[in-house]
Image (cartoon, rainbow, N blue to C red):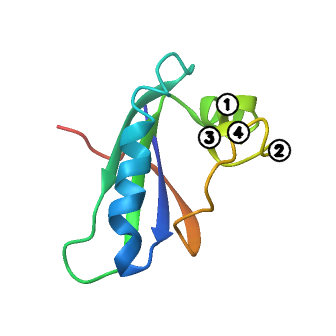
Amino acid sequence: MSIVKINAITVPADSGDELGRRFAARGDSMAGVPGFEGFELLRPSDGRTQWLVLTRWADEESFAAWTSSQHFARSHGGGSAEEDGGRPRPVGTASELWSYTVALSR
């Protein structure tokens, strides 16, 4: 049974489009990551400032392995500026990780 991880990222109203562009530019960067099943970026439509990054994983172990990998570190600004090409500063001002198991799927 899949697990779901949701990263709730607080983004200033004038920076949401930039967050969307950054995720779009990453394209299929998660292709081939063991246990990764899918991803969605959800834009708020009700005035909230939290964007949701919803990922689905085969199991908790796959997610844990990814979060301790070099791939994760690079995609989340880890490493030196030389290693990540001078990655721009984060768009979000805060984030919170939510974890769920799938109770029902149709």
Q: Is residue 18 above or below residue 105?
A: below
As drawn, the residue found furthest toward the right would be 80
- CB under 8 Å between discs 2 and 4: yes
Residue for badge 4: 84
Q: Disc 3 versus disc 4: distance between alpha carbons?
A: 8 Å
- Of 84 and 60, nearer the camera is 84
Q: Element type at marker 1?
A: helix
Could you tell me if residue 8 is visible in this image?
Answer: yes
The residue at 57%/68% (across/down) is 95
Q: Element type at marker 2?
A: loop
Q: Is residue 41 above or below residue 70?
A: below
User: Does residue 57 appear left or right of residue 89 in this picture?
Assistant: left
Q: At which x and y percent is residue 50?
A: 40, 73
Which of label 2 and label 1 is nearer to you?
2
Could you tell me if residue 49 is visible in this image?
Answer: no
Residue 71: which numbered mark, if any? 1
Residue for badge 3: 75
- Mark 3 or 2 closer to N-term? 3
- The amino acid at mark 2 is Ser
